[in-house]
Amino acid sequence: MEQSGVHNGAFGADKFGLKGLKAVHWNLGTAALYEHALQNYEADLTREGALCAETGEFTGRSPKDKFTVRDALTDKTMSWSTNQSITSEQFATLHADFLRHAEGMTLFAQDLYGGADPKFQIKTRVYTELAWHSLFIRTLLRRPETAALADFVPELTIIDLPSFRADPVRHGVRSQTVVAIDFTRKIVLIGGTHYAGEMKKSVFTTLNFYLPEQGVMPMHCSANVGPKGDAAVFFGLSGTGKTTLSADPGRTLLGDDEHGWGPDGVFNFEGGCYAKTIRLSREAEPAIYDASLRFGAILENVAIDPETREVDFDDGSKTENTRSAYPLDAIPNASPTGRAGQPKNIVMLAADAFGVLPPIAKLTPSQAMYHFLSGYTAKVAGTERGLGNEPQPEFSACFGAPFLPRDPTVYGKMLRGLIARHNVDCWLVNTGWTGGKFGTGHRMPIKVTRALLTAALDGSLRDAKFRTDPYFGFAVPTSLPGVPADILDPVTTWTDKAEFAKTARALVDMFQKNFAKFEKLVDADVLAAAPEFKQAAE
């Protein structure tokens, strides 16, 4: 078997059961992986130097094809209402079939860390069939120093084989695509999909399972830190501005997707960013734009001109979920350590396509837990297949339900405790619509959002005058220098006031119906933080 690159010779591929391989390329860097990807016709080189790949049928995660082994470790600790199970025996069969499928292949292996805090990180080895997948995961996780590779022993092993096809009957899965996790053996098997994001999300899922027992709260969030060491955490689902708003030139970026909050503060899980690029422009997001075009960036499903190789970020013909993966150091003000102290502010981002939430609201600790467990945003036509003209609410518990193996209340109670312990200010920010719902109103101006966030993070918004929202009960500022007063009160931006009241009541009802599943699991003060019709005023 041919081998290249630096690795622990005493802990090679054979330790995982991989036999009969043609070659293993260990811990190759960016340039070498570019060469392999281009030689194997896996991707194209863009004019500016990024690598552009297509993921085929799957342009996003495949949550219905994700399975976890149900055994003595997970039986009572997993939330089986939101996670699918397979047996240890089915996983063993799948694992053996993966190893058999890999025989004769050339694989790329990366030894990496999940987590920037050495006390809580997980040593992760990732075997991939494709060179560009190896570059992707090398970019998105944290990279050890070369000297550490010689004695690297993985705790978690991922094998990613897009050409593998699962057998639903034999393996107990749904289709030919599979993402299977065994928390006891710490093995992840990914097959039948070219979507590279499944690898990093599997690392998140693993950390999200183990960290709560170590007193660390895992969070699907971005985070940054101000010049005075004041960290801020931004929760939000895809498309709410999590990546954009945390990339603030006046603050240092910790990361854009998943973090832990432990005894020493906040730490990033990753070593890179994974940004949405649809309609990305240098004018609106210069740091992300430049990072996405540079050598070392990986573009997914982004259109490029076949002749000039010029990138077209406005073209969503392949998918609206076009992506860029780039290393954190591509952002000029990114933290080299990925660590900061205890956060001073928590921001929950909701892209409200119904246009009734204010641009910012201050939350009490009880309200924060309510909205954290709700995890609200709204989807609009064009972002996903099958959506009609009307906005559709999306409630994803803890702003990351697909990656949370445990019951959402486990994470919610941890958050509440941390907010109280560290006296954290909590804010709800609407990055969605104002002046009417989607189709009538318009998107919240990013200048307004940034001005309000700046005031929240520097502490000046705390001293503003507030009103109580009649529908949601949270505190809303009535004025802020540089922000039009009418935009702070959403009803004033609507021409049809009766339609606003109808829409607001409908959204309140959606919140209440969604939260019903948590009613018996939370304290009375959290239930009291729910929006109420009776509070509404015409």
Image (tube, grey):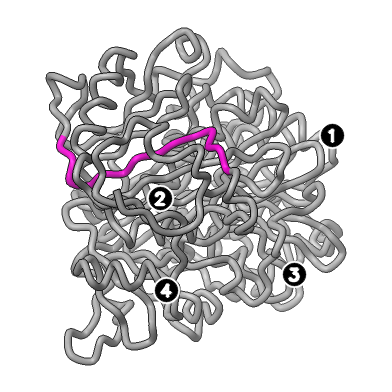
Q: In the picture, residue 262 is in which quadrant?
A: top right
Q: Secondary structure at mark 2?
A: strand
The type of residue carrying mark 3 is Leu
Dot in front, 1 or 2 = 2
Identity of the residue drawn at 69% across and 33% down: 216
Range covered by the magenta-colored residues: 152-165
Q: Is residue 509 above or below residue 274?
A: above
Disc number at residue 342? none
Looking at marks 1 and 2 on the same chain, the residue that comes earlier in the sequence is marked by: 2
Dot in front, 1 or 3 = 1
Identity of the residue drawn at 43% across and 39% down: 202
Q: Residue furthest bottom?
A: 308
Q: Which residue is mark 1?
A: 421
* Residue 42 visible within the image: yes
The reply to whether the magenta stretch includes residue 163 is yes
Identity of the residue drawn at 44% across and 66% down: 495
Q: Compute the Cα span from label 4 to label 1.
A: 46 Å
The type of residue carrying mark 1 is Arg
Q: Is residue 116 above or below residue 451?
A: above
Q: Compute the Cα span from label 2 to label 3.
A: 52 Å
Q: Compute the Cα span from label 1 to label 3.
A: 29 Å
Q: Which residue is mark 4?
A: 31
Q: Compute the Cα span from label 1 to label 2.
A: 42 Å
Q: Which residue is mark 2?
A: 109
